[in-house]
């Protein structure tokens, strides 16, 4: 296949857009028409896959109404709330486009960037991911936590996960097919995007204000996802515990040598029960921390070996694009 043939295929690409939604009834009616209008300017073959991740509001009814109004819309209703990562997986596995966009349902991802992302793909880039310029909508604690997380997960790692890059991105069909080959249940999509590799480039963006309501993904959700990401893509916690154990062993030997030297050289009394009790409590805490970290890894192994499906689909509305 010649380079010109590949270029022509990329120019005449079909487009899928995956949009996970959880309690977004107030946003979908505003966001979906805007997204469809932007996609329609890029291709005549378009599908918008909305994944209802067990919403408790009227999201399912709004999705059904949108399917009746727009034939490009596909509604997937999961059997319960599985989380954003499984919802993204469901949407990607359903998509049939040559190009796949991922957008949030709250309207914070600017559709004005979609043409630029598509142009980069037409020029041969397989993944175009958006990087936040600022985090003004987050607390200082959240910002500091995010910075520490990326430094820790990328520490001595062969696969570098771009900092401040979320799910807002474009991927070619080859990238999505590679993601579908990854079988893990505890999915950390930002890590999986980086792990599969391919030719990638970044663009900057500024998140827009939410159209309606408040975010369903706060600090607790970020913390839970961070733990999943660390355990799935890094052995840094285990290395830190090993280094801490080595440091404490050296410190204990040094302290023991100092006590012996101080006793025989200066005739000082050997410290008594207080030192022993404090030392025992400190070492016991380190041991419990180490066991807890090991237990988290073992727990993830336990979840994986059960081989339960990542999500369960309750219903689908809409045809979407034909399979390639």
Image (tube, rainbow, N blue to C red):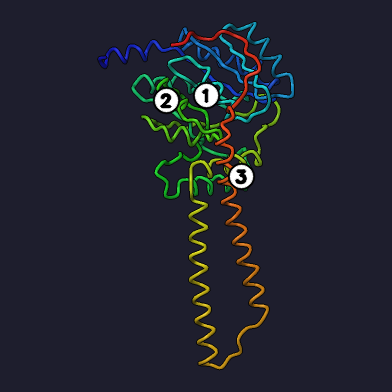
- What's the mark number on residue 175? 2
Residue 289: quadrant of the picture: bottom right
Disc 2, SS: helix
Q: Nearer the viewer, mark 1 or mark 3?
A: 1
Q: Residue furthest right?
A: 57
Residue corresponding to mark 3: 142
Disc 3, SS: helix
Residue 121: quadrant of the picture: top left
Q: Position of residue 7 (x, y in %)?
A: 32, 15
Q: Position of residue 312 (x, y in %)?
A: 62, 22
User: Mark 1 and mark 2: span between their CA atoms?
Assistant: 13 Å
Q: Position of residue 248 (x, y in %)?
A: 52, 68
Tell which circle, 3 or 2, labels the residue nearer the N-terminal end: 3
**Quarter of the picture holding the N terminus:** top left
Residue drawn at the location 55% of the way across and 89% of the way down: 263
Residue drawn at the location 51% of the way across and 63% of the way down: 245
Tell which circle, 1 or 2, labels the residue nearer the N-terminal end: 1
Residue 297 visible to the viewer: yes
Q: Who is closer to the viewer here, 87 or 133?
A: 87
Query: Callout 1: 10 Å neighbours few (<14), some, many (20+)?
Result: many
Disc 1, SS: strand
Tell which circle, 1 or 3, labels the residue nearer the N-terminal end: 1
Residue drawn at the location 52% of the way across and 58% of the way down: 241
Q: Residue furthest left?
A: 2
- What's the mark number on residue 102? 1
């Amino acid at each position: 296949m010649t380079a010109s043939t590949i270029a022509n295929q990329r120019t005449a690409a079909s487009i899928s857009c995956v949009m996970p939604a959880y309690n977004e009834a107030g946003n979908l009616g505003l966001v979906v028409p805007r997204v469809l209008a932007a996609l329609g300017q890029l291709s005549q073959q378009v599908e918008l896959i909305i994944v209802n991740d067990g919403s408790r509001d009227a999201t399912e009814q709004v999705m059904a109404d949108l399917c009746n109004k727009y034939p490009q819309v596909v509604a997937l209703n999961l059997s319960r709330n599985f989380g954003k990562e499984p919802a993204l997986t469901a949407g990607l596995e359903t998509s049939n486009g040559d190009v796949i966009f991922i957008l949030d349902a709250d309207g914070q991802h600017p559709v004005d960037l979609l043409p630029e992302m598509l142009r980069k793909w037409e020029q041969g880039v397989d993944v175009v991911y958006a990087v936040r310029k600022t985090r003004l909508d987050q607390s200082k604690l959240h910002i500091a936590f995010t910075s520490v997380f990326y430094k820790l997960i990328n520490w001595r790692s062969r696969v570098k996960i771009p900092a401040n890059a979320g799910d807002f991105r474009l991927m070619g069909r080859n990238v999505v097919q590679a993601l579908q080959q990854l079988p893990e249940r505890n999915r950390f999509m930002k890590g999986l995007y980086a792990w599969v590799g391919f030719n990638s480039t970044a663009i900057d963006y500024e998140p827009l204000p939410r159209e309606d309501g408040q975010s369903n993904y706060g600090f607790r959700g970020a913390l839970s996802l961070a733990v999943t990401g660390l355990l799935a893509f890094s052995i840094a916690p285990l290395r830190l515990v090993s280094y801490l154990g080595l440091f404490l062993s050296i410190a204990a030997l040094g302290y023991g040598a100092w006590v012996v030297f101080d006793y025989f050289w200066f005739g000082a009394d050997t410290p008594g029960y207080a030192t022993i009790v404090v030392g025992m409590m400190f070492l016991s805490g380190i041991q419990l921390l180490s066991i807890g970290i090991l237990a988290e890894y073992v727990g993830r192994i336990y979840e994986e070996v059960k081989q339960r499906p990542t999500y369960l689909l309750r219903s689908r509305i809409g045809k979407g694009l034909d399979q390639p």
